[in-house]
Image (cartoon, rainbow, N blue to C red):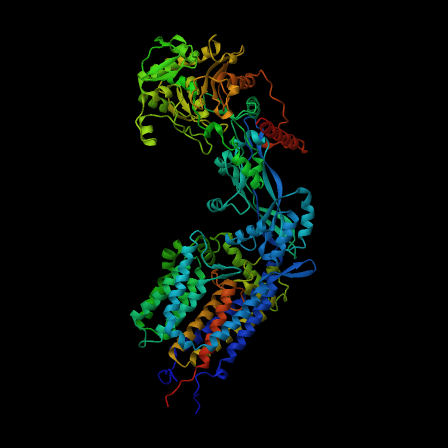
Amino acid sequence: MTQGMEERHIWKANWALLFFTVVLSVIGLLNLYSASVIRLGEGISLAPYFHRQCLWVGLGVLCMLGCMFLDYRRLISSAELFLILSVALLAALFLLYPDNAIKRWYPLGAVNFQPSEAVKISVMLLAAKMLSRGKNPLGWKEFGIIVCIGLVPAILVLKQPDLGTAMIIMLILGGMILFRGVKVSIVKVGLVFLVFSPLALAKLVLPNLLDYQRDRLIGFVSPDKASPKSVYQSEQSKIAVGSGQIRGRGYLEGTQSKLRFIPAKHTDFAMAVFGEEWGFVGSVTLVVLFCIFLLSIYATVSSAGDRFGGMLGAGIFFYFFWQVLINMGMVLGIMPVVGIPLPFISYGGSATLVNFCMVGLLLNISMHRYVFRVV
Amino acid sequence: MRISIESEGYQPPKHGLIMLQVLLALLFCVLVFRLWHLQIVQGDLNLQRAQANRWRERQIYANRGLVLDDQGVILAENRPSYAVALTREDCPDIPSTLAKISQWTGEALSKLERRYQNSLLEGVPGFNPVILAHDVKFGRVAWLESEALNWPGVTVVAQQRRFYTHGAKFSHVLGYVALANAAELRDYKDLFRGDSVGKRGVELIQENRLRGAKGLEMQEVDALGRPLVRENKNRPHSGEDVRLSLDADLQEAAALALGGHSGCIVVMDPDTGKLLALVTAPSYDNNLFTGRLSAEDWGKLRDDERHPLQNRAIQSVYPPGSVWKLMMAAMFLREGIKPGETVACTGEFKLGNRSFRCWRSGGHGRVDMLRSLVESCDVYYYQMADRVGIDKLTSFALSSGFGRLTGIDLPSEKPGVVPGREWKATMRGEPWQRGETVNASIGQGYTLVTPVQMAVYVSSLLNGGLLFKPLLLDGARPEAFGRTPSTEEERAFIVQAMRRVVEDRQGTAQRLGRRDAVIGAKTGTAQVVALKDVRQRVEDTLYEHRDHAWIATWGLKGEQRYVVVVMVEHGGGGSASAGPVAVAVYDYLFGAVKPRSVPRQVAASGYVVRPQDDSGLDEAIRASTQWVEFIEGSK
């Protein structure tokens, strides 16, 4: 009998996924070390980011282990509760800090907790639960319900204001729905929507964005019309990556990042530092690594033992996919500047923890990939 | 054992898996193609741009506009000051760096930590320097800059600090600038943490003109980030200079004349409403506020029982006493009372079982309107006001500019009180009493006016009845906010009566008489506490029970026309204590006394002549400390 009798087989976990997660994290830390370096005459000093990120990665690994060994199917029953709790935390920010212009986090001593990260996971969980039920393909009613589940938290996040995270939530949801398959009529309407979306963007979205968000979008579409500041970030980032040429300028040798021309070089633009110092060879290697990482997620999705696992796996695939696409696209100047970090490479406590949790869930799904038969 | 069972042989949706594969392939192709384009096709170009890219943006502070007097004497200017700032993103160890800054500057560590925490809460970006310690001593700057090289993230920032050359003499008019608070940072987008903003007086009202616009500077840096060359991108636009209508020398002469009393002096051009002097005593040194005012100093200023922070000319309301009779007489004329009609003054006026005393216990005998003003007979006003009634009095006073704001361009002006039936009904919920009309007729009871209102009214007697908004700025357009109900003849009668107050043998303001000019005046002694049976000598009365002394005057000499109103708190008799102050002011105005020759820093046609050495500064500091000592000593 090839099918196992035990529920959980640790040796059947997706070891490739774990391996590439570790490789990407190590590259991320090395790159962050370079981004944190401050030159002082002859010596070198470090900005505090590097040490903190090491700590976050350590905590992330613990979270990953936690997510691995707790049966993911238990999450099904409490998916609604998770979403309600996380949305409540999000809404409470607006009530607690009505005066702050920016309502993104709870200051918890040395650490800031971002409820929008928790919202991402809980939307994904509930969507996976709902999409794993019902008949094939998805009808209009279920489609509408699932879109609404995403829209409420997405609008709250948009008001924080955090355009990037709001976008990611809706994009993950869209990816999951398409993966599941929908009625042909929904696809048709979706296509019509897509055709008219530039118009809708100009009429509905643009006037409601904040100045800096609008500036970034306009700067992307036509750099001549935007304020110099919004084009500046994107320009400097392109110069940094481009100046790496084939072999790069060498580790710790990038001038764009050391002289602080790159904005947010630790966080959203960490890839620019990498591109500058490691060149085309290094950057393509990183892209390949991300693709293999995503492929190993794909492997788990395609071999998942149950529908919920498969849907959740697809959600996590899109979670990483969109971030890699949007962040790298932004750094390379083919996407507008939106605040989305590059998984495992960018500095950020909450994001690192969530990334490792996601990998832990995937490993969990991969361990349960065999179907049990009642003997 | 519970086993959850999935429908046998779950297969993920096929088209979904294909979609994932396609997306992954697209991701790879798009990113690799773009990298190839940027790094290989445009690689040389981008490397060149990176090497040429050594320019950083920096903000440059605009000079705040100067404040000048009517002659161009500088009243408020800017001086360099140095601050220690911290750039979060460059700093490897914030707690120990803060401790080091505290050690260097002597600022308490807890304060620095709080300022740093506040900058985090306000969302200051990590690569913006946050100013933590202000006003580093100049002698320490070079040393600090060399020390800062070993502490990444620490920079010494050159700023400007406002300096008020005349210190206490103009502090109520100029106000001061101080660090912007959270609300101001929110309201003005171009302000940053650590910037100063006008908080009171002209500095507050003229903030938009004075502030100017910050500039942008491109700074070239070497490979280690050290600055090399600077180049302006947007020049900063200095704030506009603000020229006041006040005369610094007159202000000084007037302040000296007050001789340590609490009180105020208003000197006004009756034909435009322009203020030539606006003195309030006691005063405070507004330079205290531009640095970091210690809690102790602030407490002293706030709790001082003589209220040095109060601008008495516009914020303090006083009973006007007999000066009020100028307005009363004009009202009687308007109500048809003939100037020749007489009243017999026996020294008191009986109303029911109450008796209202005249200031001269023996009485003035038969008094007509002219004599009632010249000798300031109270009984005449008691009787006439009782006849005319409170309603006429109230409406005439309101249309003469009392009981309402004059609109002077200074914050927190008070309107004073013109009592009447309606006022009493709303404020006290009681009906008006006849006896209160009698009290109101000589500017006692509920009646309260500000000195500047009185100056506006006296000016209206000379300028054809126009009530001018008091102007502080040179070149401001005269702005009348009303017209008194009197006719030309009625006003002329009052003006002539004021002249007789000075020139008549029985006049109460004879000490103002002078050979070189024509002066008119009206004195006033406003009771602070109810009149006692036996009059005490001023010296025997408690300071806070002593009467307020008023004198409202005008002076003419050829083309020159001035209105001078003096009010001395608890000064006793109007003529005796306010009179000499007015005399001193006219001595200056009509040139009998040459202004003390203080070294002047005159700004002419936009170019500012600054003293080359610091002697001007020392002089100004000495002058302001003398002034403070002078006030302190008089207590």
Q: In which quarter of the image is residue B436?
A: top left
Residue B425 location, quadrant:
top left
Camera-nearest residue between B62 and A38:
A38
Q: Where is residue A249 in the image (x, y as percent from the top left)?
A: 63, 65
Please state which of residues A175 and B409 is positioned toward the viewer in this rendering: B409
Residue B349 visible to an observer of this rendering: yes
Residue A371 vertical placement versus A84 (above, below): below
Residue A170, quarter of the rendered image? bottom left
Depth check: give the residue in front, B546 or A205: B546
Q: In this view, does B207 lie to the left or right of B398?
A: right
User: Foreground: B463 or B631?
Assistant: B631
Give the x, y percent position of residue B480: 40, 25
Please indicate whether residue B49 sits to the left or right of residue A370 in the image. Answer: right
Q: In this view, does B110 lie above or below B254?
A: below
Q: Where is residue B41 in the image (x, y as percent from the top left)?
A: 56, 66
Query: Vertically, is A280 above or below B296?
Result: below
- Taking the image as shown, residue B548 lies to the left or right of residue B627, namely left
Q: Can residue B464 be seen in this view?
A: no
Q: Where the C terminus of chain A falls, by quadrant?
A: bottom left
Q: Where is residue B206 in the image (x, y as percent from the top left)?
A: 49, 35
Quarter of the image for the N terminus of chain A: give it: bottom left
Q: Residue furthest bottom?
A: A1
Q: How many labels does the image show?
A: 0
Q: In this view, does A23 lie above or below A202?
A: below
